[in-house]
Structures are given as structure tokens and as C-alpha cells.
Image: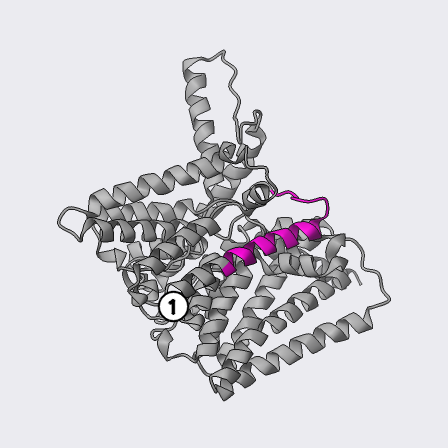
């Protein structure tokens, strides 16, 4: 198992190194010498390591990946990415303290968007670009990109994709998994280019438009401005960003069906219909709650729609401080943190499909109480007999909420107020970023203790990989250590 893992880790590291080229060019362009070196050195080192491993093992055929090995590969890759992404932040001196750098990097790659930086506008522009690019790389999945670019990984590509992709059901769009990964990434890049072009039309600068597009499609939330999207004071920019946050929250497999002409059955997708209904209903409710005695209707509608899209997509952008909104509106936004976007999207949270399945199961249970001898089946996407998925979803939500409670306890031990500890844990596990109170959209995570930052790093990766992947990785490590200790005792 070691050789395939070593190769995968080296390819992921090399891809991350190549991605440093864009901020390196920006650093040279803007005369940021120290930042330029902070990108150049890790980039050269990562590529050199990947080349060395490839040359050394070029004649050795790697064995196919087992399911456990795939989970270890994906979980280990994301941990590796978190540390690698922190190197430019640390070497450049843009962020003080290695723990802060790792937190910012993991928050970037997991598309959480929680930051330890008080004044992002004081950062070198190349560092801000790297922060947003981490969102973009992590949104669709770095391992998925490696599978698309390196045919060698086809030996376990499907297992890797399944371990990294969100949602309870994961399949191939095309006959070959490498082509599936390429299709998803091409769609992803197409949406990014479209938003970038529209922002340029709205008179936004090229640098800000690129960073905002990276963060939006990755549903991350890092921004080049302290006031996030609200700093641009441009309604057109806000509506465009709102639209693309929602687009990024939809299952990308549906876009593939659209592009291949199979549009007919799109609206039969249960998750898409539920997602659209939730967005519409919550937006209307927030507008009705906020409208009396507030701003003009058009501005209230724009702010409400934007923040509903921002929270349900787990992006975390803001145009207004929602922590000063009416309590009922805040409760609705908090509920959206728990719901999340669609499976197979770049959004975080529990995912709409899981809540949809549980709701349908609840309706069937009520029917059985009224009609004990009736036969009822759970339909998903107009297909009957989907009851087998219910136990898995129930198990996932149980583990998810358990992790939220444990994270809340750590937050309370770190000195956070109960409500802030609760909303902070929801935000970390759901990869949302901003929470409420001291962790709200106008605040930052720089003042929390280092041990809580370290735990939040673990939780952010767990949330991005939907918990089970990281649990299997941890279980495998402990199992390996136990077996190794047993072997030593035996010998």
C-alpha cells in the first residue's frame, strides 16, 4: 500500500506546487520580492520531490488501491495540502505564527473561509491571490484534479473520487473515471471564467475579479477586502456573486446532463427541487422579517437573497452584518448553516439530499401509523425503493452532530460563550466560516487559543471530507501502530 500512497502524495504535492505559479507571477508583477521567494521555494521543492519519486519508482507497477487505502490517500493528501499551503504564508511573514498559517491554509483548501487576519487589505496582493486560489483548488477537490491529469491513478481513481466527493451517492458521469474528473473540472473552470468576465463588465479590477471568482465557485469566502463583497458597493457585483454562489451549490452532475442535452429529467431531481424551494422560502421569510422599518425594498431583497445564498452555500461572503439583524432572521440563517448545499457541489453542510431523504422517510412513517397494513416506498429522483440509503444518512447525521457537540465543548473550554461556541462549531464542521458574536462576519479567528485553532483545523478537514474519510484515516493509523507494536512484542 505504501508505493501507491507515496505516488499519490507526490502528485498532489506537485500539483499544489504548480498552482503557486499564479501567485508567484503576481508577486513579481507587483514587486513583492519576499512573497515571490516564499512561492518559488516551495514550488521548486514540491516538483523536485515528485520528479524524484517518479524516477525512482518508474519501473515498479503500483498495486490497485483498496478502499481503505483510498480513504487514507485522500485524508492524508488534505492534511499534506494544509501544511504545504501554509508555507508561503509563513515564509512571507504575512501571517504571524505557524499555527495561524496552518489554520488559514486549511480554512482555504477546505473552503471554510474562516480567517485569522484582521486586516486583509494590508496583505501582499499575491498572498491574497493564493488565499483565494486555495478555495478554488479545494472546492472541486485537488485529488479529483490529480485523477483527471494523471492516468496512472486510474487504478484507484474511482475510489479516490468517492472518498473526496460530497454526498451519500457517488457515481461516474462517463465510462472512465479520469474523463469524469475532467468533465467536472471543465464545467467548474467554465463557471469561473463566466463570473470573471461578468465582474469585469461591472468595472471591477482584474485582480479583485479573479480573486472573487475563485472564492465564489469554491464557496469559500476569503476576500481581498475587509468588508468582503460589500466593500465594492456595487449591486450588480452582489447579484452576480449571489447567482454563482447558488450555481456552485448545485450538483455538478446536473450541469453535465444539461451540456449533453439531457435536460428533460433535471427538474425530477429531488434534491434540486428541495434546494430551490428552501432558497426561495427562506429569502421571502428574511425579507418579510427585515422589511418593516428597515431599508428600501430593493436593498432589503438584495441583502436577504445574498446572505441566504452565502450561508446555504457555505461561502460566507457578506454585504451587511447579519448579526445585528432581527433575531428571527438570524435563526433562519443559522438553520441554513446546518442544511448546506447539494451533494456533488462545492458547498458544505449536511447537504439537502440527506434532509430530503429523512423528510420523505418521516412522511412514510406517519402514513404507516395511519395505515398499518399499507405499503409505502421512499422515492428519490422519481425512483422507488430507496429505503436502503436511510441508515447510512442517519449514521452520518449522528456522527456530524456528535462532532458539533464535541467541537462546541472545546470552544467553551477555550472561553467562548455558549452561543458562540455552538455557532462556531456549526460553522467549522459545515465549512461556512463566519459564525455569530465574536466569530461573526465582521470578526476573525485570530484571538482564539492555539489549541482550539488546531482542533478547528481537524474539524474543517473532517467536514470537507464528510467525516468518515478522516475517521477511517485515523483508525488506519492507530491500527497500524497497534499491529506494529504487536509485531515488536512477538519478535
Residue 409, x across and y down, in percent = 38, 56
Percent across and percent down for residue 24 are: 55, 79
Residue at (46, 23) in percent of width and height: 364
Residue 99 visible here: no
In this picture, is 453 found above or below 74?
below
Q: How many marks?
A: 1
Colour scheme shown: one colour
- Secondary element under disc 1, as helix, strand or loop, is loop
Q: Was residue 262 drawn as part of the magenta stretch in this picture?
A: no
Highlighted range, magenta: 170-193
The location of residue 166, given as percent across then percent down, is 55, 48
Residue lying at 55% horizontally and 58% vertically, measured from the top left: 189
Image quadrant occupied by the C terminus: bottom right
- Residue situated furthest front in the rendering: 201
Is residue 293 among the parts visible in the rendering?
A: yes
Q: How many other residues sit within 10 Å of disc 1, few (<14), some (14-19) or many (≥20)?
A: some
Magenta residues, dominant SS class: helix
Which residue is nearer to you in this view: 477 or 390? 390
**In the image, 8: left or right of 22?**
right
Nearer-the-camera pick, 122 or 414: 122
The residue beneath circle 1 is 204
Q: Residue at the location (36% across, 64% down)?
A: 414
Quarter occupied by the N terminus: bottom right
Residue 196 to residue 257: above or below: below
Q: Is residue 190 magenta?
A: yes
- Specify the quadrant of the image occupied by residue 486: bottom right
In this picture, is 350 found above or below 22? above
Amino acid at each position: 500500500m505504501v508505493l501507491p500512497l507515496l505516488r499519490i502524495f507526490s502528485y498532489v504535492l506537485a500539483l499544489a506546487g504548480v498552482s503557486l505559479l499564479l501567485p508567484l507571477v503576481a508577486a513579481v508583477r507587483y514587486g513583492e520580492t519576499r512573497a515571490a521567494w516564499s512561492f518559488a521555494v516551495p514550488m521548486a521543492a514540491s516538483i523536485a520531490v515528485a520528479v524524484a519519486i517518479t524516477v525512482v519508482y518508474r519501473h515498479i507497477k503500483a498495486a490497485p488501491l483498496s478502499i481503505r487505502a483510498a480513504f487514507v490517500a485522500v485524508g492524508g493528501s488534505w492534511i499534506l495540502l494544509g501544511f504545504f499551503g501554509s508555507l508561503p504564508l509563513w515564509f512571507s511573514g504575512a501571517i504571524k505564527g505557524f499555527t495561524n498559517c496552518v489554520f488559514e491554509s486549511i480554512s482555504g483548501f477546505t473552503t471554510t473561509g474562516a480567517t485569522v487576519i484582521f486586516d486583509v487589505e494590508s496583505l501582499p496582493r499575491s498572498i491574497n491571490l493564493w488565499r483565494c486560489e486555495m478555495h478554488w483548488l479545494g472546492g472541486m477537490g485537488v485529488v479529483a484534479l490529480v485523477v483527471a491529469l494523471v492516468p496512472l491513478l486510474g487504478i484507484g481513481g474511482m475510489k479516490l473520487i468517492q472518498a473526496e466527493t460530497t454526498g451519500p451517492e457517488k457515481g461516474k458521469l462517463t465510462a472512465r473515471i479520469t474523463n469524469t474528473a475532467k468533465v467536472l473540472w471543465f464545467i467548474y473552470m467554465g463557471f469561473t471564467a463566466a463570473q470573471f468576465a461578468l465582474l469585469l463588465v461591472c468595472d471591477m479590477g482584474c485582480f479583485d475579479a479573479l480573486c472573487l471568482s475563485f472564492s465564489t465557485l469554491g464557496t469559500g469566502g476569503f476576500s481581498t477586502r475587509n468588508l468582503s463583497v460589500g466593500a465594492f458597493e456595487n449591486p450588480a457585483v452582489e447579484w452576480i456573486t449571489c447567482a454563482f454562489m447558488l450555481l456552485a451549490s448545485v450538483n455538478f452532475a446536473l450541469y453535465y446532463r444539461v451540456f449533453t442535452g439531457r435536460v428533460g429529467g433535471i427538474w425530477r431531481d429531488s434534491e434540486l427541487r428541495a434546494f430551490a424551494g428552501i432558497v426561495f422560502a427562506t429569502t421571502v421569510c428574511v425579507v418579510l422579517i427585515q422589511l418593516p422599518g428597515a431599508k428600501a425594498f430593493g436593498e432589503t431583497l438584495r441583502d436577504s437573497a445574498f446572505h441566504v445564498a452565502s450561508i446555504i452555500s457555505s461561502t460566507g461572503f457578506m454585504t451587511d452584518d447579519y448579526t445585528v439583524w432581527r433575531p428571527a432572521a438570524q435563526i433562519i440563517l443559522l438553520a441554513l448553516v446546518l442544511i448546506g448545499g447539494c451533494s456533488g457541489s462545492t458547498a458544505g453542510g449536511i447537504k439537502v439530499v440527506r434532509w430530503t431523504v429523512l423528510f420523505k422517510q418521516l412522511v412514510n412513517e406517519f402514513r404507516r401509523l395511519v395505515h398499518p397494513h399499507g405499503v409505502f416506498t421512499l422515492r428519490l429522483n422519481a425512483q422507488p425503493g430507496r429505503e436502503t440509503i436511510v441508515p447510512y444518512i442517519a449514521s452520518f447525521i449522528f456522527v456530524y452532530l456528535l462532532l458539533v457537540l464535541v467541537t462546541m465543548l472545546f470552544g467553551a473550554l477555550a472561553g467562548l460563550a455558549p452561543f458562540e461556541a455552538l455557532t462556531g462549531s456549526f460553522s467549522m464542521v459545515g465549512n461556512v466560516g463566519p459564525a455569530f458574536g465574536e466569530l461573526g462576519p465582521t470578526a476573525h479567528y485570530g484571538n482564539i487559543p492555539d489549541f482550539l485553532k488546531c482542533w478547528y483545523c481537524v474539524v474543517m478537514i473532517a467536514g470537507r471530507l464528510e467525516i468518515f474519510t478522516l475517521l477511517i484515516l485515523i483508525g488506519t493509523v492507530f491500527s497500524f501502530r497497534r499491529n506494529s507494536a504487536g509485531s515488536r512484542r512477538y519478535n
